Amino acid sequence: MMLSSRRGFTLALGLLTVCGLGTARAAGNDRSPDRSVSFGALRAASEEVALKQASDWLKQVGKTDGASTKAFQSIWSNPDRPLLNRIAETLSLGDADAAKLLADANDPTKPAPQTVPAILKDTKRPAFFRANLALAYAKALSNRRIFEESLDTLSSVKPEEVVDPGAYLFHRAVAEHALLRKDEATPRSSVSWTMPLMCRSATRWLRC
């Protein structure tokens, strides 16, 4: 199912407007000098945690040769790049199937998938691998306006399993809005703690 770029832009811009109001209200209610970047059960992974997880996984799959190590260091050398992008590139570096899956998902000439890929449901693979690959894959489909398959993929994992819960929540909200599944959208009661995470992802989406 397709959504116009203008409609996607409007949704992201509207979300940022709400973000501004929500941030202002939160600032007025909480003046603690040391606020944790934690919302309910969700916590965005720090760069240090994400780097360690990625490094540990790469070692687990046996990619410890000089070339792989150099490529890994290059991926993580720019702290300004989104964590999800660096995780996705690490997964592609260490797993040929993951590399092909993401390459196909990002290729506008490839047809839309019909089912959630088996690799994302393979419980023999680490949860770190499956969850973050699923998010990177769903994000690529969302950017191509392939929303039904993106939502199906996101439904196979939980936001607390990924390094960037904000990206998960943002792309899920975009897909549900596009498919008019308002009954499945983020419940009102959870908006207060999911909004800050979604705002950051909306900002990144508008910069693309």
Image (spheres, rainbow, N blue to C red):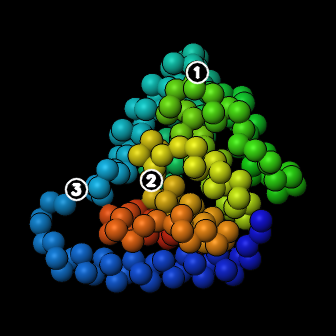
Residue indicated by mark 1: 124
Q: Which residue is tagged 2? A: 165
What residue would you read off at disc 3? 36
Q: Amino acid at mark 3?
A: Ser
Q: CA distance from mark 3 to mark 2?
A: 15 Å
Q: Earlier in the sequence, mark 1 or mark 3?
A: 3
Q: Circle 2 sits in a helix, a strand or a loop, which is it?
A: helix
Q: Earlier in the sequence, mark 3 or mark 2?
A: 3
Q: Is residue 77 above or below residue 170?
A: above
Q: Nearer the viewer, mark 2 or mark 1?
A: 1
Return the x and y of residue 52 as percentages of the image width and height: 40, 32
Q: Secondary structure at mark 1?
A: loop
Q: Which amino acid type corresponds to the residue marked 2 in the rendered image? A: Pro
Amino acid type of disc 1? Lys
Disc on the earlier residue, 2 or 1? 1
Q: What separation in Å lies between label 1 and label 3 (alpha carbons)?
A: 34 Å
